[in-house]
Image (cartoon, grey):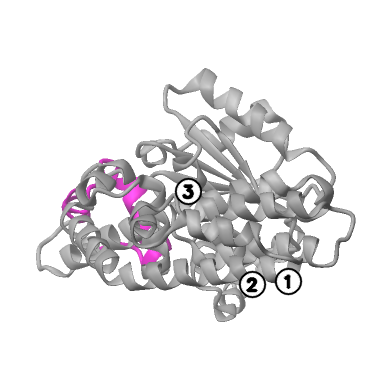
Amino acid sequence: MKEYYLQRYIYSGDEEIIREAQKHFDTEEWTKWHYAVMIESGSSFFENADHVDREIKEDLRREFFYLNLNTRQSLLLFEDMYCDYKLIVNQIRQILRRKYAARFFFAISRKFDGYKALPEILSQLEQQMEERFYHPERIVFTADEEGALSTFSEFQDSMVIEKISEDVSRKDTDNLWKHFGLLRDKYSSGFRYSAMYVKFVFSSLIQELYSEEQFAEEHDLSSAVTRLYKAEDVDEILHIVEENISEYVKFINGSMSVLRMEIQKVKDYIQKHCTEEVSPEMLSDKVHLSVGYLSFIFKKETGMSIARYMRVCRMEKAREALEKAGTSVEEAAKEAGFRNVDCFRTAFLQYSGVEPA
């Protein structure tokens, strides 16, 4: 029952769900959570992993609240504030590797105070997890990377440019402006940097914009960089960079209508095949977009990750099946693509609030 109410709350943020839950049990322990770890498998591992939380607890020797989100993702909620969660995650990874052949990825949240932050935390964890499509060699993704940019301002240039490169690759204009702002704030008031170095930093930024091939075909990189190196002061440099970013954003916004058609194709495919083993890699092949970029724009357009959208489609298919006269729970589970009926019962209860019948 706790899992049912908690999942409903973190997906909706509706405080009425908490008030309803408090009629049935004490939610005091929920106020003590400070860190969350998302575990994701490349397959539907969690559909038949009924005891994985107990196995992790036994070997890890730490307490946490376990919440199965869907067949691919689970969430661990911890109370400890003062420990190295990268170390904990590495231990969990070793435990799972010893017991299972599946490949796992992990996302570690920022510190938070209690359940009220969980809807935002879940969204951040989903976004962090999608970084694996940009960094396939990495297994663990943490929330402290962005904070490091402002913490180590003297050494952040390469880190910011790397972030901007990722922004351009996924056409994330909001974060592009944000990361440009970090460099703008650093150099707009700094007199200790040589003019040539400042021009070098911002010319690197402009060159990242032109890594978008179609944008580069329609605009002149050489002219933009030459103009920047002829600038006489920082204000002029920043003005030139802002002009180039604005042109890039205008280009991206103009291409969104085509991208929305591609997202609709993906949504249609998921709706037709959500009961099958559908992966982000498979979907990216359908629309000829990179996995990371597809994941990013899908969430931007629909408000939910691909995994969450698939879960909704499966549950709605199950609901439709159960509404048909004479359909058993076992038949509905099969129609919704569940091999494990008990897992289906739990997932349906968490999604709809009622037992499947």
Q: Is residue 50 left or right of residue 38?
A: left
Q: Nearer the viewer, residue 105 or 333?
A: 105
Residue 347 colored in magenta in the image: yes
Pick the front one: 47 or 205: 205
Q: Are marks 1 and 2 in contact (CB under 8 Å)?
A: yes
Q: Which residues are magenta?
A: 329-357
Judged by depth in the image, the label closer to the viewer, 1 or 3, is 1
Residue marked by disc 1: 235
The 10 Å Cα crowd at callout 1, few under 14, some 14 to 19, many 20 or more, is some
- Disc nearest the viewer among 3 and 2: 2
Q: Secondary structure at mark 3?
A: helix
Q: State the image coordinates of residue 134 (x, y, percent, origin top left).
A: 47, 42
154 shown above or below 267: above
Please give the residue where the numbered disc 3 appears in the rendered image. Answer: 130
Place residue 229 in its image quadrant: bottom right
Q: Calculate the distance from the C-alpha at mark 3 to the C-alpha at mark 2.
A: 33 Å
Q: Is residue 209 above or below residue 116?
A: above
Q: Earlier in the sequence, mark 3 or mark 2?
A: 3
As helix, strand or loop, the secondary structure at mark 2 comes to helix
Q: Is residue 297 left or right of residue 200?
A: left
Q: Which residue was labeled with disc 2? A: 239
Residue type at mark 2: give it.
His
Q: Residue at x 30, y 43 (%)?
A: 279
Is 6 covered by the magenta stretch? no
Q: Is residue 126 visible?
A: no
Tag 1–tag 3 contact (CB < 8 Å): no
Amino acid type indicated by mark 3: Glu
Q: Residues within 10 Å of mark 2 (few under 14, many from 20)?
A: few
Tell me where residue 30 sits by quadrant: bottom right
